[in-house]
Amino acid sequence: MAKASGIRVSWLNLLLVSLTAVTITLSIRIVGALLIGVLLVIPASTAMQFRRGFGQTVLLSILFSLLSVFAGLFLSYHLALASGATIVMVAIALFALSLLLTRRV
């Protein structure tokens, strides 16, 4: 849409791809490949349910990612569960909750 509006987006696209590549590369040893995919997709999908602007969606996505990780680690420690799977389940639960909260009939 920005390109159709006449905005030069080639350098923004390169920046976004580069930052995503660096994030994945640095995170792969810490959280694993499957969890990286989940932490990139589900929090962004959750944030998009609230239909805000681009900046607010990015901030909400970061917030949902951090919330998923901290709540997942907390629950996995106290309930003796696998941490990766617990983080994924928390992220999915947040997405489901966002669907219920933003449901438009």
Image (tube, grey):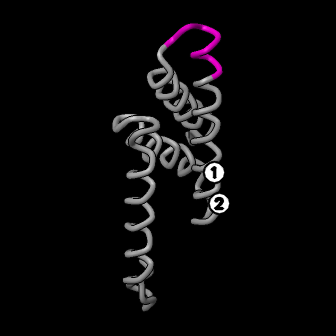
Up-down: is 84 above or below 11? above
Q: Please name whichever residue, 50 or 24, is drawn nearer the observer in this view of the structure.
A: 24
Image coordinates for residue 18, horizontal then vertical, percent: 39, 68
Badge 1 marks a residue whose secondary structure is helix
Q: Quadrant of the N terminus?
A: bottom left
Image coordinates for residue 61, horizontal then vertical, percent: 58, 50
The furthest residue to the top: 79
Mark 2 vs 1: CB contact within 8 A: yes
The stretch of residues the image draws in magenta is: 74-81
**Residue drawn at the location 45% of the way across and 64% of the way down:** 19
| The quadrant where residue 105 appears | top right
Q: Main secondary structure of the magenta part?
A: helix
Image coordinates for residue 3, horizontal then vertical, percent: 39, 84
**Side of 40 relative to 47 (left or right):** left
Which residue was labeled with disc 2?
56
Q: Which mark is residue 60?
A: 1
Q: Please name whichever residue, 101 or 68, is drawn nearer the observer in this view of the structure.
A: 68
Residue at mark 2 to residue at mark 1: CA–CA distance? 6 Å
Badge 2 marks a residue whose secondary structure is helix
Identify which amino acid the numbered label 1 is placed on: Leu
Crowd tier of the residue under label 1, counting other residues whose Cα lies within 10 Å: few below 14, some 14–19, many 20 or above? some
Identify which amino acid the numbered label 2 is placed on: Gln
**Residue drawn at the location 42% of the way across and 59% of the way down:** 22
**Side of 30 relative to 56 (left or right):** left
Crowd tier of the residue under label 2, counting other residues whose Cα lies within 10 Å: few below 14, some 14–19, many 20 or above? some
Is 37 one of the magenta-colored residues? no
